[in-house]
Image (cartoon, rainbow, N blue to C red):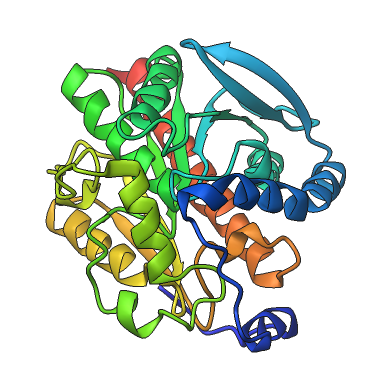
Amino acid sequence: MDNNIPISDQAMRVILDEPYNFPSRAKENLNAVRAGSKAYIERKVEKTLEHYCITLSSQSIGGVSCLIARPRTLRSNWKIFYTFGGGFVSGSAYEDLTIAAPVSAITGVEVIIPEYRLAPEYPWPAACDDTMAVYTEICKDRIAMLGESAGGNLALVTMFRAKKMGLNLPVAAALISPWCDLTNLGDSMDFNDGRDPTLSLKQSNMAASHYASGQDLTNPEISPIFGEFDHTFPNFFISTGTRDLLMSQSVLLANKLKASDISVELNIWEGLWHVFEWNMDLPESTLSLKQISDLKLSRRIKLISYANNKKKYYY
């Protein structure tokens, strides 16, 4: 699915604001990167929470601190398990509320966001272990999964582990610009390096080295695109943009899912970049999150619920 919507003036201003600033992800600079990201997004998060009437709470689940976003009106008891991005080296549950809060409001359900540990202080598999610890505790409920960038990676790895352990898989999954191949292969890694205003190849390679130094990057628990999928996995929705440094990874993942007899919809936004949905000021962000929430996650949950109820009554 391609969006043939003209690029908004707001998005065009971001594109034209060259040269792009890519803070170094060198180990000695990571604390400054983390602090700068949080300072930049804090006002936007507060504005988002107020606009969507979302309340927050903290809870330890499976020994992992989680942020819970709850809408004013809870319309269903199913939940969204959300994994934030940041290249495994930065980011937090709070900083991704510009995505998670609108999703909670539109779907009318709780969004659970684990505060997984970051590299290089805690390299692979710490983030995977934290995410899985939370999922193991909540997967008895009806769950949809949503992850962006590195969070998309964790969502896929969690599904691999859940299947291996015989746990319930989510009934729907949405991935935003998933970083599913830490070998960083694909055409877009070359032709979008310098065109994506939010992510560079150098940044991505440096994050991979912090997260999985000395590891086999083709290990499916590190690069889930190398894993095995089958028809038992949920339907997928994947969002990316033509300027996304990782666009090729979304395309290749979608192709692999389709080849594994899994329903997948790939939405490529003309002229937009890596996880543009994080920028709440873009009209495209609002539209994309509405598509993900209202048309993909909610509808899939409703279909599953209907099928389960029908089975209960008629068989």
From this viewpoint, is residue 57 visible? yes
Q: Reply above or below: 242 against 238.
A: below
The location of residue 288, given as percent across then percent down, is 58, 63
Judge from the rendering whether residue 183 lies leftward or rightward of residue 117; answer left or right.
left
Residue 9 falls in which quadrant of the image?
bottom right
Asked where in the image residue 188 lies, by quadrant, the reply is: bottom left
Above or below, 170 against 25 in this view is above
Residue plotted at (52% across, 73% down): 273
Q: Residue at x 36, y 27 (%)?
A: 126
Q: Which residue is found at the position 20% from the left and 36% from the top?
A: 232
Q: Nearer the viewer, residue 123 or 218?
A: 123
Check the image and name the residue furthest to the front: 28
Where the C terminus falls, by quadrant?
A: top left
Figure label count: 0
The residue lying toward the viewer, choosing from 265 and 246, is 246
Near-viewer residue (39 or 175): 39
Towards the viewer: 6 or 200:
200
Residue found at x 61% / y 52%: 33
Question: Would you say 176 lies left or right of 191 here?
Answer: right
| Residue 59, x across and y down, in percent | 63, 14
Q: Quadrant of the N terminus?
A: bottom left
123 to 176, vertically: above or below: above
Q: Where is residue 221? Give x, y as percent.
A: 22, 38
